[in-house]
């Protein structure tokens, strides 16, 4: 947001209306000084804060998935997934090797 443009719009709006009796003296000056002192938010600090707040849920998910992996180890009846995958991938290579011998 362009602070200069915002200041200009606020001043224009304030000048178009006459101040009432219920507005304290110097209110506009105090508001504008407060806006100037606020400054611009630091984008890197906002990102860093969001990432630090996200670490706890991420670590919890990793721990839960790791526990699930170790607790659901395959039984001998199910077989080993890594061996099944290797046999499936190498089946074509074994077939080509046996065909080239004959």
Image (cartoon, rainbow, N blue to C red):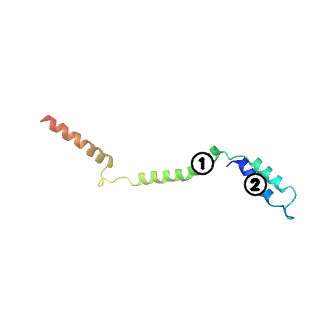
Looking at the image, which residue is at 58% across and 48% down? 51
What number is the disc on residue 52?
Answer: 1
Instruction: From the top left corner, tell me how far across and down residue 89 is, in percent.
Output: 27, 43
The residue tagged 2 is: 10
Return the residue nearer the eye: 6 or 56.
6
Q: Earlier in the sequence, mark 2 or mark 1?
A: 2
Query: Relative to residue 17, is residue 89 drawn left or right?
Result: left
CA gap between label 2 and label 1 equals: 37 Å
Return the residue nearer the eye: 41 or 12.
12
Instruction: From the top left corner, tell me how far across and down residue 4 is, in percent.
Output: 73, 47
Looking at the image, which residue is at 52% across and 51% down? 58
Name the image quarter holding residue 20: bottom right
Looking at the image, which residue is at 86% across and 60% down? 24
**Local crowd size for mark 1, using a 10 Å CA cut-off: few (<14), some (14–19), many (≥20):** few
Query: Relative to residue 99, is residue 15 drawn left or right?
Result: right
Return the residue nearer the eye: 41 or 66.
41
**Local crowd size for mark 2, using a 10 Å CA cut-off: few (<14), some (14–19), many (≥20):** some
Name the image quarter holding residue 25: bottom right
């Amino acid at each position: 947001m362009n602070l200069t443009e915002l200041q200009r719009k606020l001043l224009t709006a304030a000048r178009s209306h006459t101040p009432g009796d219920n507005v304290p003296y110097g209110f506009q000056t105090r508001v504008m000084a407060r806006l100037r002192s606020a400054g611009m938010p630091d984008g890197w600090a906002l990102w860093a804060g969001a990432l630090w707040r996200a670490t706890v849920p991420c670590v919890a998910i990793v721990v839960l998935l790791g526990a699930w992996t170790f607790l659901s180890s395959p039984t001998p009846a199910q077989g080993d997934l890594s061996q099944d995958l290797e046999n499936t991938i190498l089946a074509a290579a074994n077939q080509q090797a046996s065909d080239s011998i004959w």
